[in-house]
């Protein structure tokens, strides 16, 4: 028995207990809080180590070889931390809602933890699917729009993510077939990695498989042009679901690329046609979605679109494939998860109190709700990439990571992309600052009234903001967890 | 005592119940039903204790019957599904009797026993004659069962359709058998395999015979383009019979297909590659023609009918992937695994439908609206069943599909793999459409829905099996391990 199994099981058991009639809020908060402590404990235990730790494997089928195998390295631990922090905040801020809100939050969080902490491809895939189902159901049933509209939004997300998952499954099946040594099919990631190290595939084939995986994982992360499900889904989703999906679950696709695709197919991403395709797609995320976001006129639309846009930077880190850029990508995954969850949480609260999120109806809220304003400012500035908050560290590492092999006068496609992508940072500043100024400063809008939430309701947001500040000032806290190389030579 | 005695006993019990009802008309249907269930359960228990080798069979039957692992698996399968169907009939009886003559149900309890014996014999068949005789025993009993709710026009329509198409397919099947006999000079599977390995055998004749035979069997397992009868018959037949058709009859068809294909596609067969191409085309067509129309159904029963066609397609695709060059994963074991996982999820789905019907509700998707509010437990159980049918990971249904995908990718059948993936995506759509309806809350001021404690227990057990097999499929390992020795040993 490994502590990781406990971490995965706890939210699922809590969801079951709530489903059977346990007091929803107490059970969910209790389980999530214990889970956070457990994850912090594993973080401390892992401190300074390299490679996989806390491994444990329970075979569930011998041939083809399947096992419920858990294990964590620095990347998984950072994402588990992200999950538990966001899950605690998301559950904490639920207010006066039926038990299904708690159950679905626990299931999404538990599924994400399962996906990040298991090391068998079968379970990595399966846990992610488990987390997707409550997401769809919650958007369709409790989304914030007319039933017909929210159902349409939920179906759109379902179709994109469902087809994306199946493409991903095809890619994973391909990997399993290529890298199962001997006569037994195996889904164990470590065994597959060993085989990939011993018998690497020819580059052309790596590129093909990588591209299939990129399409599969990419549509889960709203990679342009498979992104159009994401913004309406987040704008419509109930607050805890928006926090958990955009903050945590969406990172699964990126995690999969970094944990599965890159180590098994180290040359795939560098083959020219794959790289160019990826660069074009991620520029679509950054530039097209940046412009779309600037034109949004409601806060939830801005946040939802910005969350799609920021994925472009993480893909940029993956496209570079260097150690620095990949570690930067992981840090940015963490940072983006925390900051977008903070912003969606605050946005949901504003909607509940004000009933509208349209910029032309809002203004001057800072004078009524100063604490709220400060918390929102944390999210805003983190999102822009202000130094001192975590996002900055991630973005800088990604940008620098693309220039490790810089030769003056001969910029590669990657480096040109970085130069163009930098303009996205400007766009982020434009839309986030405009939103911040329009909502919190200026003359108070008539007829709208908002006060600071009670302190107990502020705690989850303070926790997220503090995380951004602490890891932003000391990014080595996260970097120390990633001492082992992401992509093995 | 041997396995054969048990089978004969089951058939005799079926006949006895039939006679009992005829001569003692006031016997309650509960007594009849419980006797049938008790008899089948006893048969299942005895089945585990009797010797499991061909030599234990009575001498006169040995030339026709064999007991290998495939046969034993399907015999157990037939017993389990029969018990479940008999119990489901008893559970739905108050509703069903409204549509039967004089409110009688006796044949609904005796015929399944005969069907069960037929399926068990079929699993052991060593030659095409036995296959034909047992297949007819099963099909003729189903003609009666499908049309049993005689006062319902749907049931009558279904009965007539099933009768006409079933009879036609029987004719086609016999025609195929005749051609095979003409080409190979034998009816036994071993003899056919040997003859087909001989280059002197006429390829055209054998190929034509095999193709016609496969068309005949295609009717029985609902393979496209011979699947048109399925939606109407499934919709019209009484729900327990639909479950029986969809699981029992399909499994029986696939065991025969497995046996026939083992002969046609044996090592060195002159028609092996053509048959394989035939299976790939039929399988790809079947998954698509099952899944795509299912997206537009408004009746859940019809939806399940189309989905059952698409499941047959996956099974056919699995059969097309013979033994892999590299991996220990043979097609007959994947088919057995798929069917073993298919049983609990399909029965659970039809059980839910039957319970809804027993509560006076319809079978349309709109009747499922707000089910979660009316009966959260039933909604949860149906969700598990549908999620598993859709092939959601961590449920039993995913693994079977995964193995089919693995097989197709391993052999490089990309076209078929793409068809299978499209069908799976469509499957997600139509199952989740129904699940979503169950959890929709608006406009549901309907009374809550109740069902008996036993029904809860059985349905809960089936749901648990689905979930457990989804995360811990090891109990089915034996099914998956190819056991070539037993197949070859005669």
Image: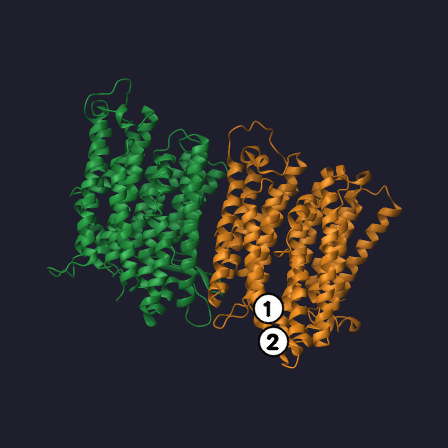
Q: Which chain does the green colour mark? A: A
SS at badge 2 = loop
- Counting from the top left corner in percent of width and height, residue A17 is at 47, 40
Q: What residue is at 42 percent from the left and 52 percent from the top? A: A165
Above or below: residue B158 compared with residue A181: above
Residue position marked by numbered label 1 in the rendering: B275
Residue furthest out toward the front: B204
Q: Residues within 10 Å of mark 1 (few under 14, many from 20)?
A: many
Q: Is disc 1 on the same chain as disc 2?
A: yes
Q: What residue is at 35 percent from the left and 42 percent from the top? A: A230
Labelled pair 2, 1 in contact (Cβ < 8 Å): yes
In the rendered picture, chain B carries what hue? orange
- What's the CA distance linking mark 2 and mark 1? 10 Å
> Looking at the rendering, which quadrant does residue B179 occupy?
bottom right
Q: Where the N terminus of chain B falls, by quadrant?
A: bottom right
Q: Residues within 10 Å of mark 2 (few under 14, many from 20)?
A: many
User: Which chain does tag 1 point to?
Assistant: B
């Amino acid at each position: 028995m490994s502590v990781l199994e406990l971490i995965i099981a706890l939210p699922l058991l809590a969801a079951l207990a709530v489903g059977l009639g346990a007091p929803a809020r107490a059970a969910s908060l209790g389980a999530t809080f214990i889970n956070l402590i457990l994850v912090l404990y594993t973080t401390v235990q892992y401190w300074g180590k390299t490679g996989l730790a806390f491994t444990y494997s329970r075979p569930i089928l011998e041939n083809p070889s399947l096992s419920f195998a858990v294990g964590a390295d620095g990347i998984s631990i950072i994402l588990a931390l992200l999950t538990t922090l966001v899950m605690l905040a998301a559950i904490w801020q639920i207010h006066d809602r039926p038990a299904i809100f708690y159950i679905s939050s626990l299931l999404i969080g538990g599924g994400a933890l399962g996906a990040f902490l298991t090391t068998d491809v079968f379970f990595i895939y399966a846990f992610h699917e488990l987390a997707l189902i409550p997401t769809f159901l919650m958007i369709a049933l409790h989304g914030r729009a007319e039933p017909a509209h929210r159902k349409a939004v939920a179906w759109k997300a379902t179709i994109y993510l469902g087809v994306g998952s199946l493409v991903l499954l095809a890619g994973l099946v391909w990997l399993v077939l290529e890298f199962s040594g001997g006569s037994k099919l195996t889904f164990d990631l470590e065994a597959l990695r060993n085989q990939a190290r011993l018998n690497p595939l020819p580059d052309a084939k790596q590129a093909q498989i990588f591209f299939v995986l990129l399409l599969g994982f990419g549509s889960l992360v709203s990679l342009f042009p498979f992104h159009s499900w994401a913004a309406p889904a987040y704008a419509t989703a109930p607050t805890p679901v928006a926090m958990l999906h955009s903050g945590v679950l969406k990172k699964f696709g990126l995690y999969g690329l970094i944990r599965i695709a890159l180590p098994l197919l180290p040359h795939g991403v560098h083959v020219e046609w794959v790289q160019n395709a990826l660069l074009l797609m991620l520029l679509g995320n950054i530039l097209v979605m940046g412009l779309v976001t600037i034109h949004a006129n409601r806060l939830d639309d801005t946040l939802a679109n910005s969350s799609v846009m920021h994925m472009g930077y993480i893909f940029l880190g993956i496209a570079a494939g260097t150690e620095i850029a990949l570690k930067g990508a992981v840090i940015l995954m963490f940072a983006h998860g925390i900051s977008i969850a903070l912003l969606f949480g605050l946005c949901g609260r504003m909607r509940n109190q004000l009933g509208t999120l349209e910029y032309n109806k809002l203004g001057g809220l800072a004078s009524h709700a100063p604490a709220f304003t400060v918390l929102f400012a944390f999210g805003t500035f983190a999102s822009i990439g202000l130094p001192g908050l975590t996002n900055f560290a991630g973005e800088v590492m990604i940008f620098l990571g693309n220039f490790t092999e810089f030769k003056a006068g001969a910029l590669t496609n990657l480096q040109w992309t970085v130069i163009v992508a930098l303009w996205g940072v400007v766009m982020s500043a434009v839309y986030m600052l405009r939103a911040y100024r329009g909502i919190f400063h200026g003359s108070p809008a008539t007829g709208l009234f908002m006060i600071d939430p009670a302190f107990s309701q502020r705690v989850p947001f303070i926790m997220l903001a503090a995380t951004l500040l602490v890891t932003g000032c000391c990014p080595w806290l996260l970097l120390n967890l990633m001492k082992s190389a992401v992509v093995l030579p | 005592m041997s396995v054969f005695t048990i089978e004969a006993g089951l058939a005799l019990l079926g006949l006895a119940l039939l006679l009992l009802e005829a001569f003692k008309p006031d016997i309650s249907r509960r007594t009849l039903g419980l006797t049938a269930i008790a008899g089948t359960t006893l048969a299942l228990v005895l089945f585990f204790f009797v010797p499991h080798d061909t030599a234990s069979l009575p001498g006169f039957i040995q030339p026709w019957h064999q007991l290998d692992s495939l046969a034993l698996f399907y015999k157990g399968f037939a017993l389990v599904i029969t018990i479940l169907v008999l119990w489901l009939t008893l559970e739905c009886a108050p509703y069903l009797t409204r549509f039967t003559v004089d409110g009688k149900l006796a044949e609904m309890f005796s015929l399944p026993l005969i069907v069960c014996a037929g399926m068990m014999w079929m699993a052991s068949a060593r030659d095409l004659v036995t296959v034909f005789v047992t297949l007819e025993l099963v099909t003729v009993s189903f003609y009666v069962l499908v049309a049993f709710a005689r006062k319902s026009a749907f049931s009558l329509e279904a009965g007539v359709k099933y009768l006409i198409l079933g009879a036609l397919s029987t004719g086609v099947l016999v025609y195929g058998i005749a051609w095979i006999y003409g080409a190979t000079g034998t009816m036994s599977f071993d003899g056919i395999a040997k003859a087909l390995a001989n280059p002197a055998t006429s390829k055209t004749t054998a190929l034509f015979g095999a193709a016609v035979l496969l068309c005949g069997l295609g009717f029985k397992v609902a393979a496209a383009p011979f699947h048109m009868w399925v939606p109407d018959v499934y919709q019209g037949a009484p729900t327990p019979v639909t479950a029986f058709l969809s699981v029992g009859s399909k499994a029986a068809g696939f065991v025969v297909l497995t046996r026939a294909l083992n002969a046609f596609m044996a090592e060195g067969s002159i028609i092996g590659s053509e048959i394989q191409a035939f299976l790939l085309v039929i399988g790809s067509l079947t998954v698509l023609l099952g899944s795509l129309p299912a997206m537009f159904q408004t009746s859940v029963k019809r939806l399940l009918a189309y989905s059952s066609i698409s499941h047959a397609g996956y099974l056919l695709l699995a059969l097309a992937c013979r033994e892999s060059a590299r991996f220990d994963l043979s097609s007959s074991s994947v088919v057995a695994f798929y069917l073993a996982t298919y049983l609990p999820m399909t029965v659970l789905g039809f059980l839910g439908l039957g319970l809804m019907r027993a509560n006076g509700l319809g079978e349309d998707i709109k009747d499922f609206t707000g089910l979660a509010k009316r009966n959260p437990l039933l909604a949860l159980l149906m969700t598990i069943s549908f999620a598993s049918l859709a092939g959601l990971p961590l449920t039993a249904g995913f693994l079977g599909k995964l193995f089919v995908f693995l097989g197709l990718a391993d052999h490089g059948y990309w076209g078929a793999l793409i068809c299978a993936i499209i069908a799976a995506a469509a499957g997600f759509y139509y199952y989740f459409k129904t699940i979503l309806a169950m959890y929709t809350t608006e406009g549901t001021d309907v009374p809550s829905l109740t069902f008996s404690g036993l029904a809860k227990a059985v349905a809960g057990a089936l749901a648990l099996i689905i979930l457990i097999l989804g995360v811990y499929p090891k109990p089915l390992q034996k099914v998956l391990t190819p056991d070539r020795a037993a197949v070859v040993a005669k």
